[in-house]
Image (cartoon, helix red, strand yellow):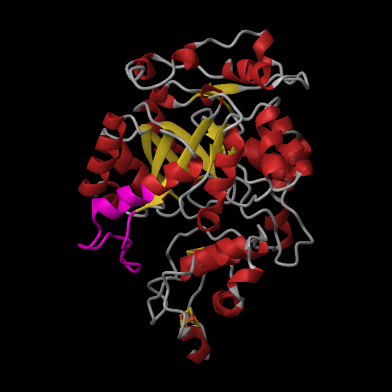
Amino acid sequence: MRKHEMGRDRRQFLKTGVACLAGATFFPPVLQEEPSPKSQETKKERKIVTRTLGKTGLRLPVVSMGVMNSDNPNLVKAALDAGIVLLDTAHGYQRGRNEEMIGGIIKDYPRDSYVIATKVPGEPTDRKTGLFTEEAKAEPFLEKFEISLKRLGLEYVDILYLHSVVRREATLYEPYMTAMENLKKEGKVRFIGVSTHRNEPEVIQAAIDSKVYDVVLTAYNFKQPHVEEMKKAIAQAAKAGLGIVAMKTQAGVYWDRERQHQINMKAALKWALQDENVHTTIPGFTTFDQMELDLTVMEDLSLTPQEKKDLQLGMKTGMNGLYCHQCETCLSQCPEIFDIPAFMRSYMYAYGYKNLAAAKESLECMDMSEIPCELCDTCSVRCPAGFHVRQRILDIARIQNVPEDLLV
Ligand code: SF4
Ligand code: SF4
C-alpha cells in the first residue's frame, strides 16, 4: 500500500464530534470523517474496536501505543501501519530522544492520520507533599513544551498533559492551567489533560471540577486495591465528558523480579477495556510479538475463563508482582519520610519494563547521596502489597552508579 493510501485509510479511524468541530479553525477537518465498515479493516483485515475520547470527539482504537519503552522506529511504524492511531510520549522520555524518534517517523505520514500526546511536568514539586512549590512558574513549562514541539516536528500536538500529578491542588495549579488553556487558544494544542499514577481518584475528581481539562491519563489495572474507587472516579469523569486513557494496564508486566512468571498481558489489557468508560489504553509494547498480542485485543475484548484465572495467578501463588499501588501507606510508617513510592516505580521500570533509563530518570529528583535504608536495621514499613520495601530500595538505588552511556 502506498503511503498516501495508507494515510487515507488510517484517517478514517478518526472523527470529531461537536466539541471538536468548534476547534476546526486550527485543525484539519479530515478528522470529521465517519469510519465506514470497510474502513474498519486494515491490510490484516482487522475489525478494530473504537471508542470516542470523551468531548474531544476523537474516535480512537481501544489500543494505542505508549512509546516510553521503545527506541525502535520500525516498531512504531509497524504499530501505525497496523491501525494504531494515538502515540503517547513525554517531554522527558529518553531525555527527549523519544519525541525526536516519533518526529522522525510521523513526518512521512499525513498529519491527520495520527494523534500525538505528550506530557510536560510542572516543576519544582515538593516530593513530600506532591505540591508545586512557589518557584513553579508557567514560563519554564512553556519553554519545555516548545522544545517538545520542535523535537516532534509539529506545529501542534493533539493532547498535552500536565505530567504525573498526584494532588488536587497540583491538578488545579492556576499558572499551568492558564498556560495550557492559552496554548489551546494559540492552536499549539488541541486538547489538554492531566496524567496521574498516584492518588488517581483525587486527581480525576479535580480534573472534573476544573472544567478546563479534556482528557485524563490514569493508571488503571486489575491489581489496584482501590479498583472500585477508580471505577467510580472514571465513570464520573466520563460522564462529565472527559476522555479517559488508561496506562499501566499490565501492572508491571511480571509477577516476579526474575521475570519467570509473566502477567497475562492480553488478559490485563482486556480487563481495563471491560470498563466502557475507558476510551483507549497505551500499553508500552517493545517487541513485535507483544505488539501483535496487544493488537488482537483491539478486535476482541472479551475475557476467556482461562484469562480470568490467569489474572488471579499471582494472588494464588503469593507473588506480589512489580506494580506498586502508589497508595502512600508507607510514607507515614517510615521515620525518614522519603519518597518510597518513587523508588518502587523505578523498581518496576527496571525489572518489569527493563527500561533502566526510565528507572534512573524517575529517581533523578531524589537526593541519592544518602539512602536512609542503609542505616536502618529494621524496616518499619508494612506494605499492603507485600513488598519488602527496604530490600527493593537498596536494590534499585544501585542504579545511580550505572553510567549514563550504558543506559541508552
Ligand atoms: S510501597 Fe507499598 S505501601 Fe508504599 S506506595 Fe507502594 S504499595 Fe503502597
Ligand atoms: S528501611 Fe528504609 S523504608 Fe524502611 S523504615 Fe528504614 S528508612 Fe524507611
Tally of numbered discs: 0
Percent of width and height locating residue 99: 52, 46
> Does 354 appear above or below 275?
below
Percent of width and height locating residue 43: 76, 20
Question: In this rendering, would 154 be left or right of 260?
Answer: left
**Quarter of the picture holding the C terminus:** bottom right
Question: In this rendering, would 2 be left or right of 394?
Answer: right
User: Bounds of the magenta span?
Assistant: 122-145
**Front one among 197 and 68:** 68
Residue at 53% x, 10% y: name it. 34
Asked where in the image residue 135 lies, by quadrant, the reply is bottom left
Residue at 48% x, 76% y: name it. 381
**Front one among 365 and 62:** 365
From the image, give the main secondary structure of the stretch colored magenta.
loop
Percent of width and height locating residue 190: 38, 29
> Does 59 appear above or below 202?
above
**Quarter of the picture holding the N terminus:** top right
Percent of width and height locating residue 3: 68, 22
**Front one among 87 and 99:** 99
Q: Magenta span has 389?
A: no
**Any part of residue 201 in sight:** no
**Any part of residue 202 in sight:** yes
Residue at 54% x, 44% y: name it. 247
> Does 69 appear above or below 405?
above
Question: In this rendering, would 131 be left or right of 78?
Answer: left
Residue at 38% x, 23% y: name it. 55
**Front one among 90 and 362:** 90
Asked where in the image residue 41 lies, by quadrant, the reply is top right
Q: Magenta span has 131?
A: yes
> Does 97 appear above or below 1?
below
